[in-house]
Each structure stands twice: as C-alpha cells, then as structure tokens.
Amino acid sequence: MGHRGFSWHGRSMAAVLACGEGALLSHGSAASLWGLLEPIEGPIHVSIPSTSGRARRSGIHLHRAPSLRALSLAEPSPSPSSTWRAGGRRGRLLVTHRDNIPVTSVARTIEDLRATSYVPPYLVRRAIRQAELKGYRLEHIRTDRTRSDLETAFLALFASHRIPAPEVNPKIGRYEVDFLWRAQKLIVEADTWTYHRGSVAFEDDHARDLYLRQQGYKVHRFTDLQLETEPERIAADIREALS
C-alpha cells in the first residue's frame, strides 16, 4: 500500500530505517541531504556505529563506523557544525538530523568523502566549497578555499610555474576577488562564460574593475579556454606583473 515510488528523501529515510537503530545517512547521500551535492544515482550510503551484525541490503551501501556516536532521537538536533559533550568531554559533532533523517554532520560528511573513492575528487571539492558558502564551520578540514574547479586549476598552474601562492577569495572593499598578491597589488580573476555572460554580468565586471583600479590594483582576467590552450602565456603574464 502507499505510493508507487519514493522521493529521494523517502528512499534515504527508508534506507536508514532498514539498517536499524543507530544507522544514519552518510557519505555522498549525506552530502546531498545537506545540499552540498545533487543526489547521486546508485545505492543510498548508510553508516552504522558497529563493526558487524547488519546484513547487506539491496540498494544500500553499508559502512561500518564504530567512531560514530548516535544522538538520542529525543534530543534537539544541535547545529550541524557545532561541538557537543559526551561523558563530560567536549568533542566534535559526528551525528545530527536533517529533515528528520539521522545523518552525519557536515564536517564528518566531508571527512568521509575525502577518505573514500565513492565520489570523484571534483565533487568532493564542490561539496567543500558549498559547505563553506553555506557558512558551515570546517575547522578541522584544510581546504584551498577555491570556489570552482577553474580556481583550483589556476592554483595548480601557479604551483607548477613556481609563482608565489596568492591569497584566495579575499575581500577588497565590497568585492571578493579570486586571487590577490597583496604586496604587488595584483589581482587575477578566473572567468567562465557560464558566470560572466549577459549584460548584467558584463556591467558588474567593469564596475568592479574600475573600483579596484581606483584603489591602486592591477586586474588581470583569464578565461577557462585560455587556461586550457595558453597556460604558458598566462604564467608569463603573471610573472611579469609580479616583477
């Protein structure tokens, strides 16, 4: 009886319930529940705070993680990035609830994604960026602070050409820039057609560049196509601007 098909949220809740007490959504499925990734096709990932005892179930990828501490369903769910007390000791939150579904905290979810190969690296980076943009604290997780794969590729270019590492996504006045070499007052912006097309984006970019130039900064813009086809020219241009 009931619905012919479950929604993704319904499947997630059903998977957690099917795995018994202490089970919770984790890994890529948890990232989707937190809004860090789009729902990923395939089995629902569920973790249990045990090393044995649960049989495999169709449509569920079961992870055994005794380090997880399940919170009582009667307790109010704390902030997904907060700390909590267990046995009088203060520690990081590992488990919470979202949409009434038991789930690993945002920080634990990111740690799980990094520790396994179930999600490709570019999606792990995307999940981290989304967590930072949503304001979740990732105090124990080191990131390069980039907001796009293009920015990550630019950082790799700087490193491979021995260009000094810039500040990433700092704010100058009311604007946030991609890369900044503060001592040389040089800004590099990584542009794509997706995010810079249209008249509004065109005008915003020019207003932004005018403001930055008035503050004494040099602004160099490069596109994803240039990065792919002319990395040597980009590196040479930046080195010259830094000299």
Image (tube, rainbow, N blue to C red):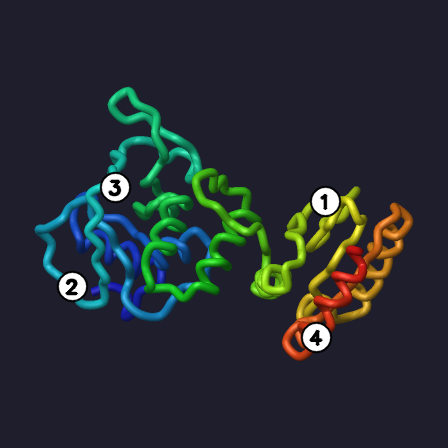
Q: Residues within 10 Å of mark 3 (few under 14, many from 20)?
A: some
**Residue at numbered disc 3:** 68
Q: Which residue does the image show at 63% across and 76% down from the upper left?
A: 228
Place of residue 209 in the rendered image (x, y in percent of width and height, measured from the top left): 84, 56
Residue 226 - label? 4
Q: Nearer the viewer, mark 4 or mark 3?
A: 4
**Residue at numbered disc 2:** 57
Q: Residues within 10 Å of mark 2 (few under 14, many from 20)?
A: few
The type of residue carrying mark 2 is Arg
Earlier-in-chain disc, 4 versus 3: 3
Place of residue 186 in the rendered image (x, y in percent of width and height, measured from the top left): 79, 53
Q: Nearer the viewer, mark 2 or mark 3?
A: 3
**Residue at numbered disc 1:** 171
The type of residue carrying mark 4 is Gln
Residue 58 - label? none
Q: Are marks 1 and 3 in contact (CB under 8 Å)?
A: no
Q: Nearer the viewer, residue 104 or 160?
A: 160
Q: Which residue does the image show at 28% across and 54% down from the upper left?
A: 13
Q: Secondary structure at mark 4?
A: helix
Q: Secondary structure at mark 2?
A: loop
Measured in 3D between alpha carbons, the distance from the residue under mark 2 to the one under mark 3, in whole angstroms, is: 21 Å
Look at the picture and state if 156 lies above or below 103: below
Place of residue 38 in the rendered image (x, y in percent of width and height, measured from the top left): 45, 63
Q: Which residue does the image show at 25% across and 37% down from the upper left?
A: 69
